[in-house]
Amino acid sequence: MTKDSLRELYVDELRDLYSAEKQLTKALPKIAKAATSGDLRMGFEQHLEQTKGHVERLEEIFGLLEERPGGKKCVGMEGLVKEGSEVMEEDISDDAMDAALIAAAQRVEHYEIAAYGTVAAYADLLGESEHASLLRQTLDEEKETDRKLTELSQDINVLAQAGSSEQKVAQRKPRKVA
């Protein structure tokens, strides 16, 4: 489809985001279940509820535009979700799994931050101030989720690192003492 105007590009990007958020509503319960840290699991569960709100905001924008939200698959999010699924299949310690889940989730958040920042700028240029306000609300929530993940990672990454050191010590062969 050729995009002859910023409005067409804007609608296309919104559809991409809608697809991304819908994919996340399916992936987040699995990610939460894979988390072993109670705080991390709770964070993923809270973000699932927030993501459902992101879908509703996008649906509101589509209603204002008198456009359908569907019809596009976000391949970027599809790849990020696939990477996250691959992480969950790995045989690693609980703490390392939590660290890996945080890394995967932050890649998702950064992708969404870039996308929401772009569509909010488009909305501004198009004079869609109500849309821009809704999009910035979601953008702020995505940034806050990223901040919370960074905060959680500070303890979880240390635990994962400590676990690797303990594992290395346990794998060493005993030395013969003469």
Image: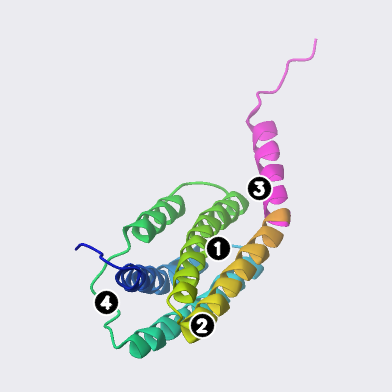
Please give the range of residues in magenta: 155-178
Single out the mark in the foreground, 1 or 4.
4
Q: Amino acid at mark 2?
A: Leu
Q: Amino acid at mark 3?
A: Ala
Single out the mark in the foreground, 2 or 3.
2
Determine contact: label 2, label 4, CB under 8 Å: no
Q: Quadrant of residue 140?
A: bottom right
> From this viewpoint, is residue 38 visible?
no
Horizontal placement of 92 versus 122: left or right? right
Between residue 146 and residue 4, name the one nearer to us.
Answer: 4
Single out the mark in the foreground, 4 or 3.
4
The numbered mark, 1 or 3, whose residue comes first in the sequence reads: 1
Question: Mark 3 = which residue?
Answer: 160
Horizontal placement of 104 versus 96: left or right? left
Q: Is residue 83 above or below residue 43?
A: above
Tell me the quadrant of the picture where the C terminus can be found.
Answer: top right
The numbered mark, 2 or 4, whose residue comes first in the sequence reads: 4
The Cα atoms of the two marked residues, 2 and 3, are separated by 38 Å
Single out the mark in the foreground, 2 or 4.
2
Q: Is residue 27 above or below residue 95?
A: below
Location of residue 70 in the rendering, given as x and y in whole percent from the top left corner: 26, 77
Badge 3 density bin: few <14, some 14–19, many ≥20, Cα 10 Å: many
Question: Mark 1 = which residue?
Answer: 35
The Cα atoms of the two marked residues, 4 and 3, are separated by 40 Å
Question: Mark 4 = which residue?
Answer: 70
Q: Amino acid at mark 1?
A: Ala
Regarding mark 1 in the picture, which secondary structure is present there?
Answer: loop
Question: Mark 2 = which residue?
Answer: 134
Residue drawn at point x = 63 percent, y = 31 percent = 171
